[in-house]
Amino acid sequence: MQFFLALEEPVEQVKKTALVHGWDFDRYEKEGKISFVSTSLIDISNDKLLYSDSLCVECINARRVVVDSIST
């Protein structure tokens, strides 16, 4: 299972961009191979964001984590 945290770009846009490159993230999501999370950075602290995301990663037993964008 992969975990994708979208901080800047909407998840639907990430999926459209991936599809152009031949990656069908909708299919992978339905197959349980990837999970997407999107969050608003306006009302959340760095510590709370890190804690909640680490819980999600543990819950789905993710083997890979993508943060878009880490600079945010």
Image (cartoon, rainbow, N blue to C red):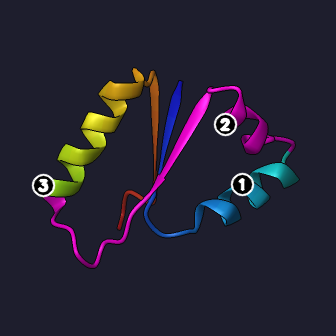
Q: What label sits on residue 47 in the rendered view?
A: 3
Image coords of residue 40 (percent x, y) = 36, 71
At mark 2, the secondary structure is helix
Residue 29 numbered tag: 2
Q: Is residue 21 above or below residue 31?
A: below
- Badge number at residue 15: 1
Quadrant position of residue 49: bottom left
| Mark 2 or mark 1: whose residue is earlier in sequence | 1
- Residue 7 screen position, x and y as percent: 43, 64
Q: Secondary structure at mark 1?
A: helix
Vertical position of residue 37 compared to residue 38: above or below: above
Q: Classify mark 2: residues with Cα within 10 Å, few (<14), some (14-19) or many (20+).
A: some
Residue extending farthest to the bottom is: 42
> Viewer-proximal residue, 63 or 38?
38
Distance Cα–Cα, label 2 vs label 1: 10 Å
Please say if 43 is above or below 34: below
The magenta segment is: 22-46
Q: Amino acid at mark 2?
A: Glu
In the figure, residue 20 lies in which quadrant? bottom right
Q: Amino acid at mark 3?
A: Asp
Q: In the image, is 16 to the left or to the right of 60?
A: right
Identify which residue is drawn at 78% across, 59% down: 16
Q: Residues within 10 Å of mark 3 (few under 14, many from 20)?
A: few
Q: Position of residue 23 (x, y in %)?
A: 80, 40
- Whether tag 2 and tag 1 are in contact, CB under 8 A, the answer is no
Q: Nearer the viewer, mark 2 or mark 1?
A: 2
Amino acid type of the residue that numbered disc 1 sits on in the rendered structure: Lys
> Quick check: is 26 in the magenta stretch?
yes
